[in-house]
Amino acid sequence: MKTKVAIIGAGPSGLLLGQLLQRQGIDNVILEAKTPEYVLSRIRAGVLEQGTTDLLREAGAGERMDREGHVHEGFSLSFNGRRERIDLKELTGGKTVMVYGQTEVTRDLMAAREAAGGLTVYEAENVQPLDFHGDSPRVRYTRDGETHELECEYIAGCDGFHGVTRKSVPKEAITCFERVYPFGWLGILSRTPPVAPELIYANHERGFALCSMRSDMLSRYYVQCSLAERVEDWSDERFWEELKSRLPEDVVANLVTGPSIEKSIAPLRSFVAEPMKFGRMFLVGDAAHIVPPTGAKGLNLAASDVYTLYHLLRKRYQENREALLDRYSELCLRRIWKAERFSWWMTSILHKLDDDAFGRRIQMADLEYFTGSHAGRTTIAENYVGLPYERIE
């Protein structure tokens, strides 16, 4: 089998890239190790930057998002028993974010790809990108006990942090930067109305908390916890009581509790791999970088990688400007490191880092300054809605 672009991974970034290329007449095949049902079972973030929503519309996968998603014009920071609202729309000249679950994004992209006639090979095992430093890369994989090879011109590694593409690069050719945080997020999903119409990020002496949502009757809540904790040790009752202890009284008064339908603990880390291009293979999304979820940047950073690679490949095939592909890492990494900084900063000022009284006072000073200054609020808002994509030329 032959194609122009082999895409490894059928998560949101792989599906989005494939759909955008497909609509430009650039043939591509997606290889995915899991089943479609497994891919859709992943519970992930749901705050989309405006650039991400624009890309989904361009890909022909934004109709249900626009119908069912929730546009948010702001969010709140809670500390010292009070809330400070960050007015995203006012502070950024009209930009907003969309709350729409990543599972739903994936479902819409799957449907759009099927309607466009794109080929996705699910349950492709033992995937191996080969010869990507030469002119004739290929991807070998096994399906139903038979070995297959996909000949291609370029490989896009959209297979996540634990995927095979980054592992296929010689260790001496890649530099990894990482910070692992000594705490995690215990999160639950419940069929209850959200406590507030916008997200609330809370700094409390007991630890961080987040009130989020997926829809009018599906809420997502988190509390900071030790990595030594086990999900089994957290009953629903214990979770709700801990969440209440970290929120202002007016918020607690509106909190509707109920049985959890999903509960998990997620570790937090910052990670960047440089470069992101190796011959004719490109790392995209979590294959190249991870951010703590505090800044709502994970899926959005993957979308910005897709934006860059899509436009570079479009210029390669429609204008024969192959040399532009050499700028992929440079263009992506400039935006990635700014998002890493913002996610690190949000994590640093909102979580209980240790029992250091000095550090706690610095957090409060930071929050007081940034929320009390128009320039500070604007800085937060500009980063939260997403910095502009890098110009291709």
Image (tube, helix red, strand yellow):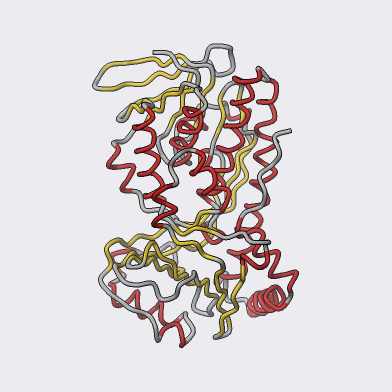
Residue 314: where, in percent of width, then height? Answer: 59, 26
Query: Number of marks in the image?
Result: 0
Residue 332: where, in percent of width, then height? Answer: 65, 39
Residue 85: where, in percent of width, then height? Answer: 59, 75
Give the quarter of the figure containing the N terminus: top left
> Residue drawn at (38%, 43%), measured in percent from left and top?
108
Looking at the image, residue 132 sits to the left or right of residue 46; the answer is right
> Residue drawn at (61%, 36%), measured in percent from left and top?
308
> Residue drawn at (50%, 18%), measured in percent from left and top?
4
Image height of 33 relative to 266, above or below: above
Residue 167: where, in percent of width, then height? Answer: 50, 31
The answer to which of 141 and 373 lies nearer the viewer is 373
Give the quarter of the figure containing the C terminus: top right
Image height of 326 relative to 40, above or below: above
> Residue drawn at (63%, 77%), measured in percent from left and top?
360
Looking at the image, residue 244 sits to the left or right of residue 38; the answer is right
Picture quadrant of residue 371: bottom right
Looking at the image, residue 141 sits to the left or right of residue 153; the answer is left
The answer to which of 83 and 171 lies nearer the viewer is 83
